[in-house]
Image: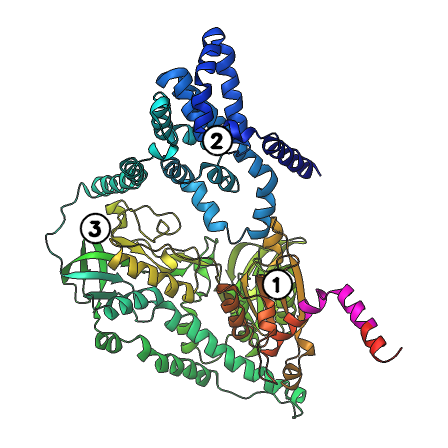
């Protein structure tokens, strides 16, 4: 109501201005005719006239009324160049700030609430560079200043910043107009002030800040590179260090555009995903799922049985899967694509020189225009007392240990209840191990909504996993041939006996040993980069796990495109990394997949949302497959079908998520999904049904009531 009353008052003042025909007084002819009278008044009461002039100017600028140009001319005509410039400069800046505040008060909250996710990039840009953009706009008077006031009021720029930037930015145009006002008698029209040469001058003035910024960037680059001697020529256009997902994609893109590129890998091609992560874990998960289905074959109308298998054969299959996928990431394939692949350890000697230590101990020196660091991450080993005295593995070393073991260890403790810990705990339990998961947080998968964490816990416990949440790991103990993990929970200390301890508490980026310290490249937990994935040196980039903030194979590949393109073509155009949509999945049974916001995130960020839910237990194909469990939960803008986020729990959840990633990427709402034909019977129909649930919840009840009356009338009732 306050905002409505405020709008009514503003509208009333503007209407009164035009109703009283006051706009006729703000014309060049009226100013010329009344110049002598106002000059006489100024001579009699200079302070009163000056104060009145400022008040009128502030009011007109605040109400966005026409006539600001005439008032600026009047400043020059009445007060001269110096005094007129001072009065107009402060009055115009005060009025502009009042208009800015009015727009912010009336519109900003509602606009940000409705379009907050779309405006995030603009908000971030204004928070970072708002003063620069505003200054550029103020220098070019061709752009209507009243629109600048209203539109910038919708952004998060600080009021004080808005005022002083406006004060300085409008000064050149103010001086031009005030000076023209001192010669008011010689003006025929306002068009005479803005002559083509003057307009060109303002345009050049508007370009100047961008030129200054580019020059500043040039100086910064020179300062960064000052202590290094740049080679006159380069052996290569790009050197990529690391042949995981980010490195492979970076090298592939460079070769595709015919750049000379060298890919350096110190261990195995394919990186962690192929050799220790995604591929072997999913192969083992599939075998474990089949063992589980055999054990519960009565669910499918068959006789339940105990699965019989050799664990060595199971691990042979895991190795076979890796070998089958290896050619996709092999030296031979990338060599055929035009990539020079070298084995060895790379060290940066300067921003353009890479020293390669070969397996035989010899070294080679490579010079390159640009470098992409794609060195990945390694499992984090916690500083746990006694850890070195017990048999422990990480998600990397687990596979060698299992391959060498004749049987699966009987008791396995998993330290960490994140995606890796949950996936491995469930599949190892399904293969016959007694598994205990220890998690310090109150629940598993803490980044998901609570109900999703509950589903994960129930799924693990249903498969025989003991879940200990809110248990802090204290130490490991080994005595008389037995091993135990000691934790502290609500009931005090608790001992978990194990034959093998799996540490799954996260991954640490590989940043040591590559010469980053000698070059002074900042590192925190990751290599510090800007929005373009540039490090301290604009020709050295980082992508994938070593750059963060996400440690997903698909995000490493996504970042690699930006790193490679910016490295090769950044002198012409650079691209900021797009993190607006980051899908993720946890491959337990049932699968958990998500993109965009979940409810916990929306609440923490104060984003309004509606929830639409569809239970997969009602889906025909899920019932037929014996997989009738889980749900789809979609968050939308209140009253709209625009998708803010989706969480799916159920069979093939990660595959089902792709439709929502596409829809959100291209701003397609639930109505578009509802209007898309989905094959029957498929799990993908669930996506259509949840859209139908949203549509039913937003059906126009009044229209339906009238339709009911119409049909009754049509039946003659």
Quadrant position of residue 294:
bottom right
**Circle 2 residue:** 67
| Residue at numbered disc 3 | 351
At label 2, counting other C-alpha atoms closer than 10 Å, the crowd grade (few under 14, some 14-19, many 20 or more) is some
Left or right of 202, for residue 99: right
Nearest to the observer: residue 601 or residue 142: 142
Q: Please, what secondary structure does the residue beneath circle 3 have?
A: loop
Element under label 1? loop
- Front residue of 350 and 444: 350
Q: Which of marks 2 and 3 is in front?
A: 2
Give percent across and percent down for residue 680. Answer: 61, 85
Whole-percent x, y for residue 2 in the image = 69, 36
**First in residue order: circle 2 vs circle 3:** 2
Residue that badge 1 annotates: 641
* 3 or 1: mark nearer the eye: 1
Q: In this view, does 517 lie to the left or right of 9?
A: left
Q: Is residue 6 above or below residue 610?
A: above
Looking at the image, residue 257 sits to the left or right of residue 229; the answer is right
Q: How many labels does the image show?
A: 3
């Amino acid at each position: 109501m306050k905002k409505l009353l405020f709008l009514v008052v503003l509208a009333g003042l503007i209407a009164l201005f035009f109703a009283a025909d006051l706009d006729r007084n703000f014309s060049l002819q009226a100013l010329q005719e009344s110049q002598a009278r106002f000059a006489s008044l100024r001579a009699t009461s200079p302070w009163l006239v000056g104060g009145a002039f400022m008040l009128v100017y502030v009011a007109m600028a605040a109400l966005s009324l026409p006539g600001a140009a005439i008032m600026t001319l009047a400043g020059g005509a009445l007060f001269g160049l110096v005094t007129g410039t001072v009065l107009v400069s402060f009055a115009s800046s005060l009025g502009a700030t009042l208009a800015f505040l009015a727009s912010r008060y009336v519109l900003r909250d509602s606009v940000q609430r409705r379009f907050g996710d779309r405006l995030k990039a603009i908000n971030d840009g204004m928070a970072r560079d708002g003063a620069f953009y505003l200054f550029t706009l103020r220098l070019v008077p061709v752009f209507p200043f009243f629109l600048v006031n209203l539109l910038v009021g919708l952004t998060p720029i600080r009021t004080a910043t808005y005022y002083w930037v406006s004060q300085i930015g409008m000064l050149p145009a103010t001086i031009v107009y005030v000076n023209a006002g001192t010669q008011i008698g010689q003006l025929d029209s306002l068009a005479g002030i803005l002559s083509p040469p003057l307009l060109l001058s303002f345009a050049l003035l508007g370009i100047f800040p961008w030129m200054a910024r580019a020059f500043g960037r040039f100086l910064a680059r020179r300062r960064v590179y000052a202590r290094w001697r740049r080679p006159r020529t380069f052996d290569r256009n790009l050197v990529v260090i690391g042949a995981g997902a980010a490195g492979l994609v970076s090298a592939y893109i460079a070769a595709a555009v015919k750049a000379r590129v060298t890919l350096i890998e110190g261990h195995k091609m394919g990186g962690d995903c192929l050799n220790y992560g995604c591929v072997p874990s999913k192969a083992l998960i599939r075998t474990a799922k089949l063992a589980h289905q055999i054990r519960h074959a009565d669910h499918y109308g068959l006789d339940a049985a105990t699965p019989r298998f050799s664990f060595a054969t199971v691990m042979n299959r895991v190795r076979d899967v890796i070998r089958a996928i290896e050619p996709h990431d092999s030296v031979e394939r990338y060599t055929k694509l035009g990539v020079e692949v070298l084995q060895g350890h790379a060290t940066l000697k300067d921003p353009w020189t890479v020293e390669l230590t070969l397996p035989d101990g010899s070294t080679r020196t490579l010079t390159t225009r640009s470098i992409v660091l794609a060195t990945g991450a390694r499992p984090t080993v916690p500083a746990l007392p006694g850890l070195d005295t017990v048999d422990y593995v990480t998600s990397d070393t687990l596979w060698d240990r299992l391959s060498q073991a004749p049987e699966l260890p009987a008791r396995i403790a998993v330290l960490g209840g994140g995606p890796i810990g949950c996936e491995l705990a469930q599949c190892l339990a399904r293969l016959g191990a007694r598994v205990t998961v220890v998690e310090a947080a109150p629940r598993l998968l803490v980044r998901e909504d609570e109900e999703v964490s509950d589903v994960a816990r129930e799924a693990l416990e249903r498969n025989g996993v003991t879940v200990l949440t809110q248990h802090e790991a204290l130490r490991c103990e080994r005595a008389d041939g037995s091993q135990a993990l000691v934790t502290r929970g609500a009931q005090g200390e608790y001992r978990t006996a194990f034959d093998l301890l799996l540490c799954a508490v996260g991954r640490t980026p590989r940043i040591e040993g590559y010469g980053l310290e000698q070059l002074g490249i900042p590192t925190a937990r990751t290599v510090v980069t800007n929005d373009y994935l540039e490090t301290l040196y604009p020709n050295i980039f980082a992508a994938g796990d070593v750059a963060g903030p996400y440690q997903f194979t698909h995000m490493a590949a996504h970042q690699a495109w930006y790193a490679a393109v910016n490295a090769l073509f950044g002198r012409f155009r650079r691209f900021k990394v797009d993190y607006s949509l980051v899908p993720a999945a946890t491959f337990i049974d049932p699968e958990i997949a998500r993109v965009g916001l979940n409810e916990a995130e929306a609440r923490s960020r104060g984003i309004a949302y509606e929830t639409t839910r569809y239970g997969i237990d009602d889906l025909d194909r899920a019932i037929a497959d014996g997989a009738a469990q889980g749900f789809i939960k979609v968050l939308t803008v209140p009253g709209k079908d625009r998708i803010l986020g989706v969480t799916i729990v159920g069979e093939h959840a990660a595959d089902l998520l792709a439709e929502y990633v596409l829809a959100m990427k291209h701003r397609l709402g639930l109505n578009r999904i509802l209007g898309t034909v989905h094959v029957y019977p498929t799990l993908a129909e669930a996506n259509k049904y949840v859209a139908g649930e949203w549509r039913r919840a937003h059906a126009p009840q009044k229209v339906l009531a009238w339709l009911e009356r119409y049909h009754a009338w049509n039946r003659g009732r």
